[in-house]
Amino acid sequence: MAGFLRLRRSVVIRLSCLSLALFAVLPHVGFARDLAGEDPADSSSHRPAHSYTLDEVVISAARIPSTILRSPAVVSLISRQDIERAGARQLADILMTGPGVFVKDYGGPAGLKTISQRGLGTEHTLILVNGMPVTSMQNGLVDLGIIPAGELERVELVRGGQSASFGANAVAGAVNLITRSRDPESVSAQFSAGSFGTREVSAGAGGGDDDGSWRVGGGIQHSDGDYPYMFVNGPATYHLTRANAGYDARRGSADLEVAPSSTLRLRTTGLYLESERGVPAIITSPFSASSAGQRDQQGILQLGLTQTATSQTWWECKLQGVYTYQRYADPGIVVNGVAVNNNFRSLEGRGEAELHTEIPSIGRMTVGCDGVRADGEGNTLTVSPLRIEAGVFLLAEHTFAVTGDSTLLVSVHPAIRYDHVRDIADAVSPQLGLQILLATGEDPLAGTLVRLHGMIGRNFRTPTFNELYYAGGGGIGNPGLSPEYATTVDAGAGISAHALGIQQIDATFFGANMTDRIVWVSAGAGSVTPKNLRRVVSTGVEISYSWMLPAAGTTLSGSYSRVRSEKRSADYPGDPTINTMLPYVPGELFSCSAAWGTDLVWGPVSRCDISASVLRVGYRFTTEDNTSFLPSYTILHAGCALELRYGGMRSVLRADVRNLLNTSYEVMMGYPMTGRSYEFSVAVAY
């Protein structure tokens, strides 16, 4: 927790390419059948399919099974192919170019990396693994820097409040990580090396078919983290080297999926992540130094069972256990004569049950319940916390054709959920979604498609264990905290056209009105404590564009978001910070990515892929009174991969250049980022 407070004090002083998937799937989807549900036997959303094409991907981050076209929320998908073409090494690399997504990066390989969506906090985006929440109840976050991209099959980014589906903590949206269940090859291995002593070795093996499959994998990562940076102090500029920014990580995973019968499917997944890293100093002078270190361990075990009753009805049951351990030690910080050595351990058990059905002429419906028991212990908590939550939910979808030829379809998506959080509060989360689809031309699949979509809902977030019970140096928890509540709204329109390939543009307006925002305020004697004080209003717009020319193997995408997140209430009489922007919320985000790939017949070389991306982040205020800010920055990444085949073996040689322009910048005050860096990798599969 001391590390958390240090980060808090520092605050005080390509997914855009995923939009390609939205309408690129149209040539393969039965438009009226998929939306109106006229052919349930042919819709993947009516069966738990093991193998799928892009258009058949069921969004796991939606309680009611849905494809992109059927969802009233704004959804982006990152496929395994997208991850590999971008050369992503960790989840932070995958998410940083998502529309409306800001990755708060505390510098270098060892730095904490968290997500911020739509101008809200890290704790307001729920992180899921295979559709089940894993966001820490200790501090309300997941470190995006310790989740390796190599373990992910795809990533789903759902924007907008999702409390009607998942309960607490999905105020800004949800990110769902789908782990890899099989490899196309039986055995694979990869080695990579790059700047600042970075290297990684990973391997995997698997096999099977639609009746059953298995996969095991693992890897180790290391980085010295000794990158150069500049520190400007008035007229003087110092060229320094980052210290105590090293990083070591290990991971292991296993997945088994079997189908004992044609109607029953069982999947079990295990994932273990472990890391040890230095916690570098906040740079306030040329002599800033730190010897702090942090160790993280997380184990996730999941079991899922799906039973098909009829072609219109099936049920599923999921169980999950999550073990988390964190230790933060800093010999340089002494409290009451003792150096900081904080640790926290938690164990969470979760269960979910859902029934999905389709009623002819009425629509689809999902009803279910879930429950979680989480307990923890740590040497900076006043108690060993125990949290028990239970929720029931009902979601529905009714789609009807306004015209006889089904070229104009309207979908209504009502949802409601009730949650009981022991010793905290009860919450009711209603939500209503609306979608209108209009297809023009004799063939809807070859013409223009117009999509209007919107959602409104009530959402909430529960206080973390740290906010309730922290009792370490510099902070005092508040057991009397209430949940945060927010009303969220989305309204948007999109157009897809088959012209010089497939082109699509979408614009979405969003807003969130939050009350009882939890804020850490002074408690006297150099301490802080959390209180329910603020009303925060966040509004903005997200615009995305994509173009795909399949015959040429070319894709181009871009996104732009503009947000204003303001404090609308006083923390004390005469508070001068009313109507000011919240710290570390970029007013503007822009990203653009391009990829080109072609098959080759040149000796053993069978394919070449080239990719590039640009990210621009607007200025961020660093103080609540908006008198200080960090300047905007632009970074450019580029990569090239060659695929070689010989016999039954495939290998990929890849080179990446990150921060190609060698931009000197900080995402968060006092945490310099790496300059230009290089990475080379070799992957072999058989």
Image (cartoon, rainbow, N blue to C red):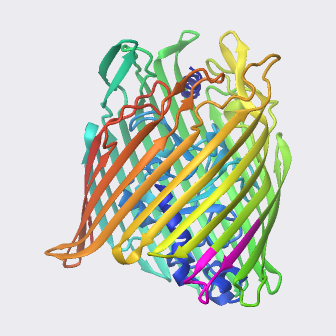
Rendering quarter of residue 593: bottom left
Rendering quarter of residue 309: bottom right
Pick out the residue farthest to the left: 603
Q: Is residue 573 left or right of residue 280?
A: right
**Residue 546's spot in the image, x, y percent?**
49, 64
Observer able to see residue 466: yes
Rendering quarter of residue 260: bottom right
**Residue 393's spot in the image, x, y percent?**
80, 62
**Residue 382's spot in the image, x, y percent?**
71, 26
Q: Is residue 486 left or right of residue 336?
A: right
Q: Is residue 447 magenta?
A: yes
Residue at the (86%, 47%) spot, across then down: 426
- Residue nearest the observer in this picture, 645 or 258: 645
- State whether residue 191 is above or below residue 140: below
**Residue 639's spot in the image, x, y percent?**
30, 55
Residue at the (74%, 19%) spot, across then down: 576
- State whether residue 608 is above or below residue 245: below
Q: Which residues are magenta?
A: 434-449
Q: Is residue 88 left or right of residue 369?
A: left
Residue at the (70%, 51%) spot, across then down: 510
